[in-house]
Amino acid sequence: MTSCLSDIILDSREPVTPARWRAETLGHSTLRQSEEGWVALGPRGSESDRPDENSYRSGPQPPAIVFVPVADEGAVKDWVHCDTWPVGRTRDKEVDALLSRGATLTDVDQRDIHWNVLSDPEGSVLCVLGT
């Protein structure tokens, strides 16, 4: 028996803004925005396209990225982050595009790696892979 990834959860002080930023970055759309304040993104077009429980039982489905509101950042930020791979352009061009949209380069004491570590406008970390 194996498990499949259904959601990637990211804590956020204000979920709408980072969700919108990540949706544009990944070419995703908003699947759902709840009354409780969380926002779910995915490559599907609407909540009705989101796989149901039976779909997950039959095999892996594309995960949703869910931004949930938190009042307190806690002692540790970014228990989970996203890795991205540029489509149709080099890593350097993708990094430049993200920097122009408000991301910042982040030093996590990396050495001899083949990716860039950035922070989105709210400070959540993402890695840009590729060549």
Image (spheres, helix red, strand yellow):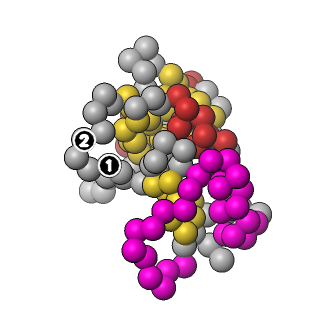
Q: Please, is residue 128 above or below residue 58 in the view?
A: below
Taking the image as drawn, is residue 56 in sight?
no
Point out which mark residue 77 bears.
1
Question: Is 94 within the magenta?
Answer: yes
Question: Is 56 within the magenta?
Answer: no
Taking the image as drawn, is residue 23 in sight?
yes
Furthest-right residue in this view: 88
Instruction: Give the residue type at disc 2.
Output: Gly
Verify CB contact (< 8 Å) between mark 2 and mark 1: yes
Q: Quadrant of the N terminus?
A: bottom left
For the magenta stretch, what is the residue range? Answer: 89-114
Point out which mark residue 95 bears.
none
Where does label 2 land, which residue? 74
Q: Position of residue 115 (x, y in %)?
A: 54, 73
Q: Quadrant of the C terminus?
A: bottom right
CA separation in Å, label 2 and label 1: 7 Å
Q: Residues within 10 Å of mark 2 (few under 14, many from 20)?
A: few
